[in-house]
Image: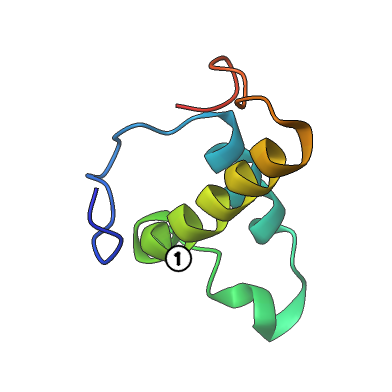
Amino acid sequence: MNNNQAPPAGGNRDYLDKALDAAQKKIPGKAGDRFRGPDAANKNRAMNEKITDFIRKQFEKMTGKKVPSKVSN
C-alpha cells in the first residue's frame, strides 16, 4: 500500500484503527475538534494509518510476534 494514500472509506478497519479513532474523539477542546464531526474519520485516515502501522511495527519489534489477526488486519 502506498503510504501517501488513505485506504478506501469503510475499508479494512480493524480494532486498532477503531480504538485510535475513539481515543482521538476524547481529546478535549480545540485540539480535539479536528477529530470530531461527521467527516473526521475520513479526513484523518492517512495520518491514523501511519500511527497504527507504527504501533504494529513496535509491537512486533518488542515481542517478536505478529499482532494477532483478530486485532489487526
Q: Picture coordinates of residue 7 (x, y %)?
A: 27, 47
For label 1, the crowd category at 10 Å Cα-Cα, with few meaning under 14, some 14 to 19 and many 20 or more, is: some
Q: Amino acid at mark 1?
A: Met
Q: Picture coordinates of residue 6 (x, y %)?
A: 28, 56
Circle 1 is placed at which residue position? 47
Q: Picture coordinates of residue 64 (x, y %)?
A: 70, 30
Q: In this image, 70 relative to 27: left or right?
A: left
* SS at badge 1: helix
Q: How many marks?
A: 1
Q: How is the image coloured?
A: rainbow
Residue at 23% x, 56% y: name it: 2
Q: Nearer the viewer, residue 36 or 70?
A: 70
Q: Is residue 28 above or below residue 72?
A: below
Residue at 53% x, 74% y: name it: 34
Which quadrant would the C terminus be assigned to in this image? top left
Residue at 37% x, 61% y: name it: 46
Q: Is residue 39 above or below residue 21?
A: below
Q: Is residue 60 above or below residue 35?
A: above
Q: Picture coordinates of residue 35 (x, y %)?
A: 55, 66
Residue at 57% x, 15% y: name it: 70
* Residue positioned most to the bottom: 30
Q: Nearer the viewer, residue 50 or 63?
A: 63
Q: In this image, 39 relative to 27: left or right?
A: left
Q: In this image, 36 relative to 55: left or right?
A: left
